[in-house]
Image: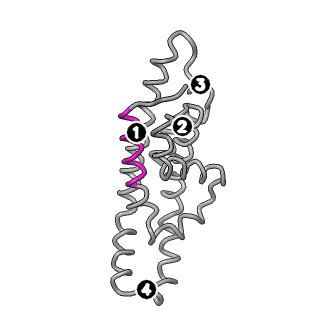
Amino acid sequence: MQIKHPEIYSIIESIAQHYRNNIANRYTRPVLTLLPLENAHWLQIEELTEKSDHYRYQGYHLDELYPMIVAMGKFIMLARKQGLHMFKQSAALADGRMSTQDKLFRDMALSNFAANLNVLADAVNKLYVKVVEIDREHAGSRPPILNRYPELNELGRYLVE
């Protein structure tokens, strides 16, 4: 089933913008790419955060959207568990190669990283709730598509751990 719902588009665009500006920006991206996330998950995150224009015309298939949500949830969990530690290790290495202004921006990005992950987690949860609502509405008497993705049962844990 394809979803062409303005609220879904709006939530995804806000997730993408927040992710690009506050999570995976030029100061954090090099370290975040070291997180032990499967390549398929990185591709799904890219689909969610970089290719919303493509989906605006064709709509989102639930079979594509649910895995994107799970991938983003796993990313958030790993970034919380390992990201800050990895930043601290790599920040010291890059100090000699950065201008004073870049160091300041990097430090701001790192000091706000945990709060920005919380904002991202809230937005992903909002997307999930809306997608499930639409899925159940369209399913009628049939089982909703979300039942095909048992890993969605772990999404809450991914978003709060």
Estimate the x, y position of residue 50 in percent, counting from the top left.
Answer: 49, 53
Secondary structure under tag 1 reads helix
Residue linked to disc 4: 98
| Amino acid under disc 3 | Asn
Q: Pick out the residue farthest to the bottom.
A: 96
| Amino acid under disc 1 | Tyr
Estimate the x, y position of residue 7 in percent, counting from the top left.
Answer: 36, 34
Residue linked to disc 2: 65
Secondary structure under tag 3 reads helix
Examine the structure image and report whether residue 140 is included in the region drawn in magenta: no
| Amino acid under disc 2 | Leu
The answer to whether marks 3 and 4 mark residues whose Cβ atoms lie closer than 8 Å is no
| Amino acid under disc 4 | Met
Q: Which residues are magenta?
A: 6-18
Q: Which mark is residue 9?
A: 1
- Tell me what residue is drawn at x 46 percent, y 45 percent: 159
The quadrant where residue 112 appears = bottom left
Examine the structure image and report whether residue 17 is included in the region drawn in magenta: yes
- In the image, residue 93 sits, relative to residue 3, either above or below, namely below
- Tell me what residue is drawn at x 53 percent, y 9 percent: 141
Q: Nearer the viewer, mark 3 or mark 1?
A: 1
Q: Nearer the viewer, mark 2 or mark 1?
A: 1
The answer to whether marks 3 and 2 mark residues whose Cβ atoms lie closer than 8 Å is no
Residue linked to disc 3: 147
Give the CA separation, mark 3 to mark 1.
Answer: 23 Å
Estimate the x, y position of residue 4 in percent, counting from the top left.
Answer: 44, 31
